[in-house]
Image: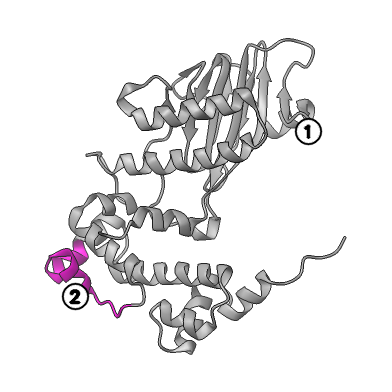
Amino acid sequence: MQQDVLSDVCAGLRLRSDLYFTAELAGAFSVLVPTEGARIRFHLVLAGGCKLMLSEDGPVIDLHEGDLVLVPNGRGHILCDAPGRKVVALSDAMAVGFDPVAGMLRNQPNEGCDVRLLCGFCAFDEDERHPGFGLIDDHVILHADDSAAAAQSSIVAMIRALAQNAEPGWQGALARLMEVLVITLMAAQLQRSDMPQGFLAGLADIKIARALSAIHARPDHDWTSERLAKQAGMSRTRFVVRFGECVGIAPMQYLQNWRMRRAKALLRDTNLSMDEIASRCGYQSMPAFSRRFKTQYGEGPGAFRRELRKPAPTQ
C-alpha cells in the first residue's frame, strides 16, 4: 500500500480547529472578516439566511439555513443582509457587541435576530504550511441534503446537530469534525480536471504521486532525482520537468523541505537524540543537518528544542 501522503502532510501541518463566536444578527448589517494567514474560515447558518461577498464589488452568494460555507487560504470576506451596506470590521463589531461569557456577537442586543451563525476556523501552523497546499476554490458551500457529496453532507449534518444541542464536549467534537471535513474536501479535489499547480496536483498525477509516496514513506533514504524518477516510472528529465509542473518546485527541493518539516516534528514531539533525528531525516552528518535546519528556520535544532521546553513564565 502506498504511503497516505495527504494524511502525512495534514499531520505535519498541525491542522487545528476552534470556534471564535456565535453571531445573532438583525436588521441591516455588513461585517468584514479580515484576511488572515492560512486559516480556513467556516460559517454554519443555524437559522435564517444572509449573503456572502468575497469583495465589496464582487458577486453576492446566498446562504440559507443549514448551509455551511468555508472560505479557505485566509481570504477576507463580507457577511451581510444585503449588498451596499456600510461595512464594519469584525474587530469593531466584536468590540461593541461581543459577550465573552455567552460567546455571542450581537449587532442589535435588544432586538431578535434575522440570522444566527456559528463561526470558526481551521488553521495551519504558519511556518509549516506546505508548498502549494490548500483548497482550490475561493469558497465552498455544503448543504446537508446534497446527495452529490454524501460524505461531506453527513459531516455537515453532524456539525449542525452538535451546534444545536450544545451538549457537554460538543465544541471538541465539532473541532475534530471540521478537521475531517477539510481533509475529505482536499481528497475530493484530487478527482478534478481543473487542478492548478500545487501539491494536490502532484497527488492527482499517478506517476508523481508514486514519487511523493516514496519520499514520505522513506525520508531517510538516499534519494536522487534518478531514483525518484525510477519510482515514478519516468526518465529523469521528464520526471523533473513534470514534478515541477505539478508541484511547483523541484523534486530535490521538495525532499529537502519535507525532511526539515519531519525534523521539526520529531524535535517537538519526541525525546529522540539529535543524531537519531538527523539520521531519520536523511542526514548522516550532524553539522550538515544543523546548517540546513538553521537555514530553513533561522535557528539550529538544539536552540529550537530548548525554546520549546523553556518553562512558561510565572504570573
Front residue of 66/134: it is 66
Three-letter code for the amino acid on which mark 1 is drawn? Pro
Residue 89, percent from left and from top? 66, 31
Taking the spot 51% from the left edge, 38% from the top edge, the residue there is 178
Q: Which residue is mark 1?
A: 100
The quarter in which the C terminus is drawn is bottom right
Magenta region's main secondary structure?
A: helix
Q: Is residue 66 magenta?
A: no
Residue 54 seen in this snapshot: no
- In this picture, residue 157 sits left or right of residue 304: left
Span highlighted in magenta in the image: 221-241
Residue 61, percent from left and from top? 45, 20
Ranked by sequence position, the earlier of labels 2 and 1 is 1
Front residue of 188/2: it is 2
Marks 2/1: CA distance?
58 Å
The quarter in which the N terminus is drawn is bottom left
Residue 98 quadrant: top right
